[in-house]
Image: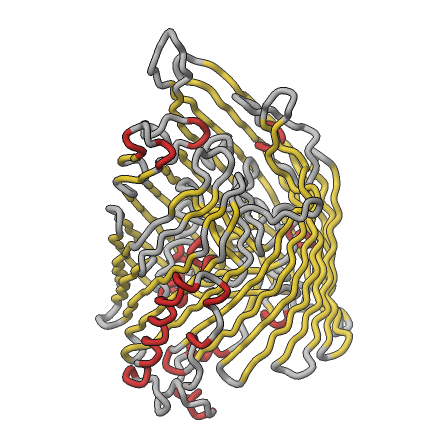
Amino acid sequence: MKSNVKNRAKDGSYSWADTPIVPLANAAAVRPALLLAAVLLAFAPGLGLGADSPAAAAGPAALLDLSLEELGNLQVPMVYGASKREQKTSEAPSSVSIVTADEIKKYGHQTLADVLRSVRGFYVSYDRAYPYIGVRGVNRPGDYGGRVLITVDGHRVNEPLYDTAFNGTEGVVDVDLIERVEIIRGPGSALYGNNAFFAVINIVTKNGRDYQGGEVAGAVASYDTYAGRLTYGNRFHNGVELLLSGTYLDSAGHERLSYPEFSSINQGVAEHRDGTSLKSVFGKLAYRDFTLEGAFMDRRKDLPTASYGTVFNAPDNFTQDQRAYGSLKYQHEFENEWEVMGRVYYDHYRYDAAYPYDYLDPQFPGRITSNRDLANARSLSTEWQVGKTLWERHRLTAGFEYRAHLRLELENFDVAPAAKYLDSHSSGDSYALFLQDEFSLRTNLVLSAGARYDYFSTFGGTFNPRAALIYSPVPASTFKLLYGEAFRAPNTYEVRYAGTGYKSNPSLEPETIRSYELVFEQGLGAHLRGSASLFRSEITGLIAETIDPLDGKLYFDNLDAVTSQGVETELEGVWAGGLRGRISYSYADARESQTGQRLSNSPRHLAKLNVSVPLYADKLFASLELQGMSARSTVRGGEVGAFGVANFTLFSRELAKGLEASVSIYNLLDQKFRDPVSSGFTQDAIQQDGRSFRVKLQYRF
């Protein structure tokens, strides 16, 4: 019973502030932040960004003044994860967003969760244990993000026991090591199999050549938070390329957190119960066609919320996650244009948690019993793929994957007096075959179609196709008609967990999705790019917690059929001199198919604005993020209100040789808002952080 806590539980005349974002979210909350953005842009002429500035010069001559980085930004971004090969996002059979390392720095993103909060259609909830990823209106309280597949350089990092999509401080890779994040929307099981349900998020890491020496970074932040990182990277004369990095974080968290639901205990205040500690290591060694890569993460998070009936404000209530992997990859393009990629990898996951309980034993009144969760998973896997262009019209890719889960263990017990509630030891394996054909019907019309067959020793086989018709009537315009199917297999926890108040369900079946999407992407001159999409997803067999009326126990079952449909729009701009911005709006209507009731924790409206303005040459930038979200219902039928958050970062580089510095203020206007949580909490929703800060220095030597 992994904790959720327990038992799961960017020319001048256009103003970004003129965009009708406020009526779509909370006008009262968002308006001050929009005014701040308007003021910032109003001062742009004084900052060298007026009509006579390079940023306003739309003519071709201005391009000669761009840096290599800015020239790259004007090009259509590249994506690997959409087809398991490098291609332009406009050619990918998906709706794709790319967030670069430069954006991560300028906006002060600290985790992958921060990156996703800035992207259209995504939102993240937090219950003070883990952040949970929501996509297009679906973010079920109580699950661990298993309907989104996260990969690092193509290697999946969702673990097999709970399907956890690590995206907070427990993320496997420090965000400073990220070259770009690829957000690939829509079902991806035709390429990736399990967990690629709503989206695939591929983290592309930096290489040794990106450093050519050492780098040290340190940060101080609110809540007595201290972080440090030491990195060395180089590409040697003999062709060997090395990257090695270590990160450490320690945070005391909130000194006091108030939960009125526990007013009878310490006046409802949890004191010194919100700490976080993290240690992580990442390494990459490459020579010619071979790349050896590995990562290790160990995070402990103290729990202040007393979820699942634990004793409020008691010590030793925590979760600890340990995730590690090692991967050896071979990739080569032969003279006859055959491309081959092969990989073998080992994965490890360990979970440990402590929950203090008062079992109300009359013989020992007030005695606190420590209940422990332990989980272990070890896997050994391999995947191979070949690709070739045939007859100048077909780009074929075929692949094979085998995964052996050598150990899948779940335990739950009381320490003293000793009592064992769960002792599950299992194993399993799966294999998969996939084929993809990108067929050029005409020079401007491509049909991308593919399918994958997966077989699991636990429940059998599943077949998942996808198809995309991609049409570019003129070079700057692209239409995409997309269809895809995907599945998520029931994980070990959902099938096997049995303990106090819970029982197992070995007959669980995979949940499935069919998705239809129409995407329009348009380049607008040299600086702007826009997109719009209409989508509909039909989900069957959605796995959810339920109560057996016969014995009152919780278990997982294929209960819900859900439909999610809506629209997403985005306008992005990049100008000479470093001025850039992005504005998006998403509408999603996610409902249970039978009752027509809206899903809990499902906002209809998401509105986002990102603006980064150069203040001095290419050395000093001011960046503003605005994020608005409409109201959401809770699992008990309540509601949390709409809100708007503003984040501001001042970022500098090379003011002194080798030095980067940033100052970030998060939730600048100190907005009060809450996120819904699962039924295992006494609280219906959890208050989120108010205004906080971070100061960061980074020096390269």
Q: Quadrant of residue 620?
A: bottom left
Choose between 125 and 416: the one closer to the eye.
125
| Residue with the most extreme top position | 363
Q: How is the image coloured?
A: secondary structure
**Relative vertical location of residue 185 with respect to residue 418 in this rendering, above or below:** below
Residue drawn at x 57%, y 54% as measured from the top left:
137
Name the quadrant of the C terminus: bottom left
In the picture, measured across the screen, residue 374 lies left or right of residue 460, that is left
Choose between 296 and 516: the one closer to the eye.
516
Where does the image place residue 176, in percent across and percent down from the top left?
37, 58
**Relative vertical location of residue 190 with respect to residue 580 in this rendering, above or below:** above
Choose between 699 and 138: the one closer to the eye.
138
Residue drawn at x 68%, y 78% as measured from the top left:
472
Where does the image place residue 238, in percent across and percent down from the top left?
42, 62
In the picture, measured across the screen, residue 582 lies left or right of residue 249, that is right
Residue drawn at x 44%, y 68% as measured from the top left:
609
| Residue with the most extreme left position | 656
Where does the image place residue 105, in percent across and percent down from the top left?
36, 64
Where does the image place residue 41, in percent across and percent down from the top left?
35, 78
